[in-house]
Image: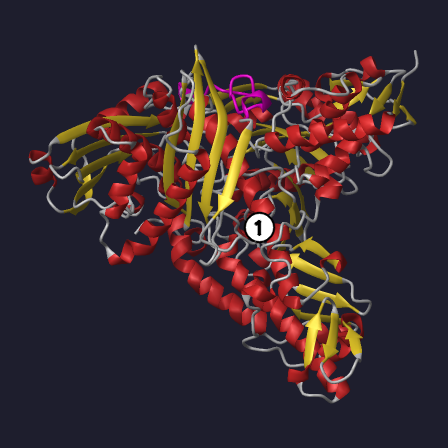
Amino acid sequence: MNNSITINGKAQAVDVDPAMPLLWFLRDTLELTGTKYGCGMGLCGACTVHLDGQAVRACMTPLGAAFGKQVTTIEGLSADGSHPLQIAWVKNNVPQCGYCQSGQIMAAADLLARNPAPGIAEINAAMEGNICRCGTYTRIRKAIVEAAVQMKGAVT
Amino acid sequence: MSMLDSSQLALNRREFLKTSGLVLGGLAIGVSLPRGVLGKLESTAFEPNAFVYIDRNGATTIYCGRCEMGQGISTALPAAVADELEADWSRVTVLQGDANAKYGPQGTGGSRSINVMLEPMRKAGAAGREMLVAAAAQTWNLPVEDCYAKLHTVYNRIDDRQLAYGELVALASEMPVPEQPTLKTRDQFRYIGQPLPRHDQGEVVVGTRIYGADKKVPGIKYAAIRHVPVFDGSLKSVDKTAALAMPGVVDVVEIPRFEKPFGSVGGVAVVADNNWVAQQALAALKIEWEAGPNGSYDTTQYKQLLVANVESPAKIEFEKGSLDKAFKQATVRHAATYVGSHLSHSPMEPMASLVWVQEDRCEVWASTQDPEGIQKTLAEYLGRKPGDITVRVMMAGGAFGRKFMCDYVQEAAALSKAVGAPVSLTWSREEDTRTGYYHSCSAQHIEASIDGDGKVSGWLHRTAFPTIDSLFNPAVAQPTADDLEDISKHPYGIASMQVESGLAPAHTRIGWYRSVYAIFYGFAINVFTDELAHAAGVDTLEFIRGIYDNNQDPQQKEQVQRCRGVLDEAARMAGWGRKLPAGQGLGIAVHYSFESYVAMVVHAEVKGDDIIVHRVDCAVDCGLVLNPDIATAQMEGAVIMGMGLALETEINFKAGAVVNSNFHDYKVTRMSAAPAEINVRFIGQDFRSTGLGEPGVPTLAPALVNAIVAAGGPRYRSLPIKAA
C-alpha cells in the first residue's frame, strides 16, 4: 500500500492515522493553511480541494482515500496567482473577510473544468455548497462568468 | 449605576459613544507628540507618528490600528493617510497594528472606525507631508510656501529641483511635528473617494492570508473544547480515561467559568498534537453537566412571554403629547405585534486564537475586534498588567460583532498555562453555534392613530428583549431607557408618543450582532408604517414622506432631510410604482442607524412556498464615501445577511441549550437565494463621513416583508419567515 499523496505536485508520505481527514493533514502537518475549516461536516465548502481533479471537501476526505492520488489546494491552483479565477476574483474585489474564498475558488475551478460556459443557474447549483457569511455571492457569480470568458479565449 | 468598571464601560455601546470623544482627544495629542523611538533609529527612517513610517528608500508603511474582519477598513483608512501624506499608494505597505494605545481606540464595533479615526489618521498623514516639505525647504533654503509634495516627491515653484521622500527622511525626522497640520480640501483628494482595490486581495486568492486559526509557532499544540451547554450551568463529572490513553493527547483540561463579561462560560478541553487528535479525544470524554438556573429556557415559550409583556401595559420610559387624546380623535387606528429571533453571528472562521503564556510574557495571536479587551481580560485572568499582554491582531475570518468578546482567547490562555506550550484553539462549528453571544430575540407591539387630516397623530411602542446590558449586570431584566432612545428619537414627526419597556430577563449571553437593536427596531417601524399606509389607503412611499415632513423639530431637521433623501433615491432607482407581473411586488424601508442613512426597495416574487428576491435597490447616505467599491460591498453583504435573518436564520433554545448545531440546522443565505441584482448609490457626500458596517442590515427584512404583501402574499410579522 502506497501511503503517499501528491499534494500540489509534491509527494508527501503520510505517517499519521489514515482516518485523519485530509483537511487537518494539510493544515496542521504540512502547514498549508489556505484550506479552511468551517463546519467539519461538508456543509460549508470552506475546505474544498481537488482530488484527482475533482472538487472534494477535505474535512470529509480521510487521508486513506487520497493515497496514491493527486491533491490540489488553493496554494497549488496556479504557480503565481494567475489562474483566470484568481485574476477575476482580484479584479472584482470579491473577498471581504476572505476566509471562505479558497473554497469558493476551488469549487468554481471545478465547475469551469466541467462546464466552460456555465449559465447563472448552473453557477448557483455548483456553488450552493459554499457559504459566504460576508455576502459576496453576486461578485462571485460575476467573477466566474468573467473567468469563463477569459478561459475560452485562451483555448480558442 | 450598574456594575460596569471603567474598561467595560468602553465596551458598552452607549457608554462607548459617550466616552469616545475623550479617547479621541487623547489620540489627537498622541498624533502630535514628539517621536519616541526616533532617537534610537538615528533618523534612518521617518516616523512622525504611530501610523506612518518611511525608510531611506522611500518604502512606506502605514499602520492600521482598527481591526480588519472583511469590512475593508485596513484599506480605506490607510488610503486616507496616504492621500494626506501625498504618498504613492503603490509604494505603501499596510500593516495591522498590535494592541497599543498609540493607535487610539482599537475596539472595532458600532460602525465607528471612520467616525472616530478618519480625522486623526488624515492628520497623521498631513503632519508627515508637512514635515517632509519643511525638510526640503530647509535643504533648498527656500520658504516652505514655495515647496509642495506630490506623489512621494517634494518640488518647489522656483526651480526644477526635487527631492524624493526617501532622501528627506533624515532631515524630516528633525522637523517639529505640526500641531494642526492643514488637511487637503476635497478637490485635492487623490485616493479618498476612489475605488482603490483592497490591499490584501492578492494574498487571499492564493491562500496565504493568515487568520487567527492559521497562526503557527514552533512547539504549537492544538486544542478542542466542549462548553457547558446551558449558560450558568457547570461541569458535574468528566471521565478522561479513554481520551488520555489516545496517542498524541497532551492533556485534558477543565476550564472553569471565568465570571467576566468576556470570560469563558466554562468547559472541558483536550490539548493534542493536532486538531484531529484533539477532536477525537474530546469525543471520547464522558461528560455530565449540571444545567443550573437557566435549564428550562425555551425560546418558543419565551417569545410567547415577550409577546404577552408587550401586549399589556409596561414600564413607560418616554412620553410626549397626549396619546389618549390622539387615539380618541383617530379616524384610523391600527395595532400589530412583531417578533424576532435569536441569531448567532457564525462567521466562517469560528472563534480562534493562538496563545502562549510564559513566565515573563504572554503573547496572543487572535482574530479579534477588540485587542484592548483581550489585554484587559487576560490581565485579570493571569494577574498581570494589560500592557504585559502582547496582542497580535490577526485577520478575522468574519466577526459581525462576535469577536468583540474574547472568551475563546481566555480559554486558549488557560490551556497554554496548563500545558506550558503555545496552544491554538479553534472552536468547532457546533460550539460556535451553541455557546455564543446571541442577538436578542424580541417582541414589539405598536399601536398608532391617524387623524382627520391624514396625519399619524399617536404612536405607542412597547418593546421587550433581553439586553446586552445583562451581560455586564445580570440584574438588568428589560430594555433600559437608553435602549429605547432609538425609538423615542426616531425622526418621524408624530405629536403624541409613548415608549414602553417590557420585562425580558436574559437566560443566555446576549451580544452585539451586526446592526444590534436596529435590526428589530427597523423591522417593526418599517413594517408597521407599511401596514398603517395600507390602513389609510395611501401609497407607502407617499405615506412615509408625509410622516417625515410632519417632523418640525429643528434639532431633527438634518436627520429628516437625509432620511427623505435616501428614501426618494431608492424609490427612484427601483422605479417605485411600476407595474409588475402577478405574484411580484416592491417593498420599501428606510432607517437611520449608527449615524448613517439607508433606504432599500426590494423586488420580490411569491411562488408557492418560495420567496424569491430578484433585485434590491439601496440608497445610502454615509456622508463622503472613502472608497465606493468597499462601501458597495458592505451594502451587498448587508443585503445577504438581512435576507438570512428575514427568511430562515434563527437560534432556538430547549431545556436551556441551543438546539441548532451546524449549517444544516442553522440556515444562512446561500448562492441560489442571492438576488440577481443589488444596486447601490451614495448620496449626501457633502456630509462628514460616517460608518457603513452595520447600517445596511436593518432595512432588508422590512422591505422584503412589505414586498411580499405587495406581491399578494401574507403579512409576516414574525422572523424568520420560514421558522423551524
Q: Quadrant of the C terminus of chain A?
A: top right
The picture places residue B603, in percent across and down from the top left corner, at: 44, 27
| Residue sitting at x 49%, y 58% | B116
Question: Residue lying farthest bottom?
Answer: B141
**What's the amino acid at mark 1?**
Pro
Work out which residue is located at the far front of the displayed protein and give it: B579
The residue under the point 52% across, 44% down is B404
- Is residue B479 in sight in this rendering? no
The picture quadrant where one finds residue B148 is: bottom right
Q: Please report the bounds of the magenta region as a residue range.
A: B653-674
Tell me the colour scheme of the image: secondary structure
Q: Residues within 10 Å of mark 1 (few under 14, many from 20)?
A: many
| Position of residue B192 in the picture relative to residue B112 (left or right) | right
Residue B7 is inside the magenta segment: no
Q: Residue B716 versus residue B552: which sits nearer the camera?
A: B552
Residue B221 visible within the image: yes
Q: Chain of mark 1?
A: B
Res A79 → quadrant: top right
For the residue pair A59 and B334, the one nearer the viewer reads as B334
Q: Is residue B660 magenta?
A: yes
Q: Position of residue B173 (x, y in %)?
A: 71, 77
Dividing the image into 4 quarters, which one contains the N terminus of chain A?
top right
Residue at image location 40% in from the left, 55% down from the top = B17
Image spot of residue B228 (x, y percent): 50, 27
- The kind of secondary structure element at disc 1 is helix
Please state if B4 lies on the left or on the right of A47 as rendered.
left
Task: Tell me which corner region of the image, top left, top right, bottom left or bottom right, holds residue B346.
Answer: top right
Residue to which mark 1 is pinned: B371
Q: Is residue B348 above or below residue B550?
A: above
Main SS of the magenta part reads loop
- Say whether residue B259 is left or right of residue B101: left
